[in-house]
């Protein structure tokens, strides 16, 4: 018997050594504080200084990703869903003292979002049950991990639902999911994510169990958000779950019908101003519980160049803006500043381009394009480098145009020796091929 007890003791000791240290769950709560609220982790006040997270190359890079983000002053990541990489991300986040707003994906109900999905929340009872069970399975799987800050249900499903019965059916289903998630895991708050304040009237009427709102907001309109929440009937605290410069969907179009992208200086300034000026009073008052800047990803595509912190291996202005917003540290030396990009003429397949960039150091200049009129989403988002050569005068280039039909979005790209990439954009009508 003594031998059995000794053997059992060895097994228990080995088990304790092999089990990860994060078996002790961290408890998150949103508590009332005066006229506002306070987010707490294990009883201590917590404000989410976050970014949305796609990563730079999967689990192999998560440790480096989290280390870099920690150095920028980031303390929280947001994902849109769970998968095979989630455990590795939570582990890397925990190692570096970061927490994660874990996304629980719910299918959109109108084609045009991810994978052009279009789920019918009114009629597809079997599909609703499948989503319900899959969501709870992910909550049960990850709820004990101390890197979990909260659960974020869905992403802009109300925005991407037809008006009327479809929105109501989704909202009623969402309440069922929220209640089940809170029962399965009472230790973490639950929020749902949608665009601007569109979800608030439906959440207030049909989803009373939510702990907070997740609001995706872009551009300088963030200064008007708190009033918009009040006008929409909001009575709960909120997170800004996506934020950055004005997006393609809301900017004016140029003479060729292409959206006019904000300049890199505006992209930088809107992030710093959004956190330090627009949101600061509402963080202090306990209305806003945190911010997630979009997006930490290495994607060198249309969205990556417009809103990303990285483009391939290069850092974009948003990278440095996140650091200044959260830590006050400005880039040193100053980033190159695109001043002007102009197509001065087109002859056959060649364009004469002027590209002016202010920089204290030498730059590697290149040009690329996207064709927003392409047939598929992948083609529309693809950034393709163009052949170019220096022109006859300083600051000018000859750029070979692609063989497409219609207007293209032209990028002037300038990279300094520190790996910072700045961009300017314009459009050009490609001549019809003979």
Image (cartoon, grey):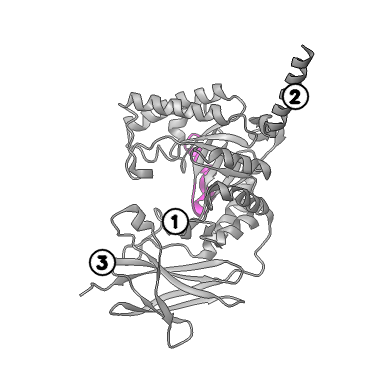
Residue nearest the observer in this picture, 344 or 371 = 371
Q: Per the image, is 227 magenta?
A: yes
Looking at the image, is 259 positioned above or below residue 362?
above
Q: Where residue 59 appears, x then y in whole percent?
A: 56, 46
> Can the viewer see residue 273?
yes
Are the residues tagged 1 and 2 within 8 Å (C-beta)? no
Residue closest to the far top: 1
Q: Is residue 277 left or right of residue 217?
A: right
Q: Secondary structure at mark 1?
A: helix
**On residue 303, which mark appears?**
1
Query: Which of pointers 3 and 2 lies earlier in the amino acid sequence?
Result: 2
Report the residue at 61% width, 68% height from top. 418
In the picture as drawn, the residue positioned furthest to the right comes out as: 2
Report how far apart the C-alphas of labels 3 and 1 lie in the structure.
Answer: 22 Å
The residue indicated by pointer 3 is 405
Reading the image, the residue beneath label 2 is 10
Q: In this orientation, which residue lies closer to the viewer: 83 or 416?
A: 83
* Residue neighbourhood size for the residue with mark 1, other residues' Cα within 10 Å, grouped as few (<14), some (14–19), many (≥20): some
Residue at image location 40% in from the left, 38% down from the top: 157
Residue pushed farthest bottom?
A: 392
In the image, the segment drawn in magenta is: 217-235
Locate residue 355, reporting x and y percent: 46, 77
């Amino acid at each position: 018997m003594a031998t059995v007890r000794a053997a059992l003791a060895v097994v228990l000791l080995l088990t304790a050594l092999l089990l990860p240290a994060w078996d002790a769950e961290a408890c998150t709560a949103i508590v009332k504080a005066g006229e506002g609220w306070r987010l707490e982790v294990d009883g201590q006040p917590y404000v989410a200084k976050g970014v949305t997270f796609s990563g730079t190359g999967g689990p192999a890079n998560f440790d480096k990703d989290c280390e870099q983000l920690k150095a920028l002053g980031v303390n929280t990541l947001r994902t849109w869903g769970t998968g095979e990489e989630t455990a590795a991300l939570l582990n890397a986040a925990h190692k570096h003292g970061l927490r994660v707003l874990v996304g629980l994906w719910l299918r959109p109900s109108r084609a045009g979002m991810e994978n052009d999905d279009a789920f019918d929340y009114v009629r597809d009872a079997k599909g609703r049950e499948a989503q319900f069970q899959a969501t709870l399975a992910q909550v049960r799987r990850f709820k004990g991990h101390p890197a979990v800050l909260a659960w974020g249900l869905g992403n802009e499903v109300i925005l991407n639902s037809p008006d009327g019965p479809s929105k109501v059916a989704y909202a009623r289903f969402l309440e069922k999911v929220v209640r089940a998630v809170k029962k399965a895991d009472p230790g973490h708050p639950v929020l749902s994510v949608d665009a601007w304040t569109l979800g608030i009237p439906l959440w207030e009427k049909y989803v009373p169990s939510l702990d907070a709102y997740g609001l995706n907001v872009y551009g300088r309109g963030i200064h008007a958000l708190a009033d918009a929440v009040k006008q929409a009937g909001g009575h709960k605290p909120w997170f800004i779950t996506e934020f950055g410069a004005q997006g393609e969907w809301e900017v004016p179009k140029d003479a060729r019908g292409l959206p006019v992208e904000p300049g890199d200086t505006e992209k930088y300034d809107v992030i710093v101003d959004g956190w330090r000026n627009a949101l600061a009073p509402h963080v202090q008052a306990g209305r806003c519980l945190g911010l997630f800047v979009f997006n930490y990803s290495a994607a060198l595509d249309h969205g990556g160049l417009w809103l990303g912190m990285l483009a391939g291996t290069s850092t974009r202005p948003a990278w440095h803006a996140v650091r200044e917003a959260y830590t006050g540290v400005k880039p040193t030396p100053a980033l190159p500043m695109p001043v002007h990009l102009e197509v001065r003429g087109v002859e056959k397949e060649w364009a004469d381009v002027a590209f002016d960039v202010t920089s204290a150091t030498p730059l590697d200049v290149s040009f690329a394009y996207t064709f927003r009129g392409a047939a598929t989403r992948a083609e529309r988002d693809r950034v393709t480098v163009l052949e170019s050569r220096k022109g006859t005068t300083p600051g000018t280039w000859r750029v070979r145009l692609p063989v497409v039909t219609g207007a293209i979005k032209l990028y002037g790209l300038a990279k300094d020796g520190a790996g910072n990439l700045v961009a300017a954009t314009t459009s050009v009508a490609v001549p019809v091929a003979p």
